[in-house]
Amino acid sequence: MGLTNSYVLCMALMLSFSSINCFDITKILGQNPEFSTFNKYLTETKLAEQINAAKAVTILALDNTDIAPLAGKSLDAIKTVIGTHIVTDYYDEKKLVEAIGSHAELATLSPASGLAAKIYVALINEGEVAFSSAVAGSTFDTKLVKTVTTEAGVVSVLQVTQPIVKVADSAPALSTPVLASGAAAKVASPTASVVAEAPKTGAAGAPAPSASSRTTFGFVGVVMAFASIFVSL
């Protein structure tokens, strides 16, 4: 009886251990020096820990040349970008084609919210597999290069050509509005209109008569004086 129980216990332990996916993504990528920067970022962003704890995962790896645009960016920005390269399910090239047919949204480990954390896969040109962010207006610019390694149903490492999403700038650029020529003239001299529309004060005197007006009044006075002399005669 004791021997039977021991056997059952051993079998249960063996089954439990076999159901755990034991892999280390850093070791897998470490066998390919061309992915050393990508591998380093996975460790620094803690994404490697999430990958190793996953039951099934697909890594869309970038080589050291294609990941270069992320150099100097913040760790949060890097995590947001390469997080979209970690799909939370197993996809080899065959299964990717199936996902294309269903137009499925592939969930990723990106910390972004909503569709920004999901990607699409599609066939472009003459049968090239390509990836895009699920955000509206995104384009399929990231292409599949090759399969690096796979463990059926557990982990798949595929090389792609460039980041699926672009890293955001540290601060948004300030846009300069384009004005029509008439509007630009008004904006260029805002004080001119204010001065032109300023009300006149009540203390201001009546406008002084011009020189021509004074000459006319003098001539009329002379004529009237002569007229009064003739009347008195």
Image (cartoon, rainbow, N blue to C red):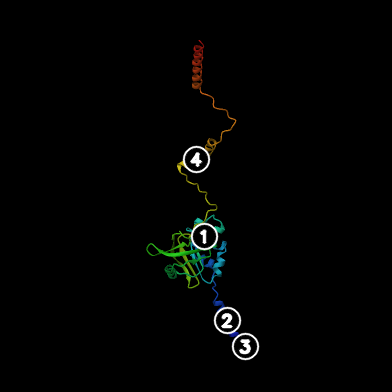
In terms of sequence position, does the residue under pointer 4 or pointer 3 come before the other?
A: 3
Q: Position of residue 221 (x, y in %)?
A: 51, 17
Q: Are marks 1 and 4 in contact (CB under 8 Å)?
A: no
Q: Relative to 30, does residue 192 appear above or below in the rendering?
A: above
Q: Relative to 179, does residue 150 appear above or below in the rendering?
A: below
Displayed quadrant of residue 7: bottom right
- Residue for badge 4: 186
Gap between marks 1 and 4 measured at Cα: 45 Å
Gap between marks 2 and 1 measured at Cα: 41 Å
Numbered label attached to residue 119: none
Work out whether residue 220 or residue 106 is closer to the camera in this orientation and state it: 220
Q: Are marks 4 and 3 in contact (CB under 8 Å)?
A: no
In terms of sequence position, does the residue under pointer 1 or pointer 4 come before the other?
A: 1
Label 4 residue SS: helix
The 10 Å Cα crowd at callout 2, few under 14, some 14 to 19, many 20 or more, is few
Gap between marks 4 and 2 measured at Cα: 83 Å
In terms of sequence position, does the residue under pointer 3 or pointer 1 come before the other?
A: 3
- Residue for badge 2: 12
- Residue for badge 3: 2
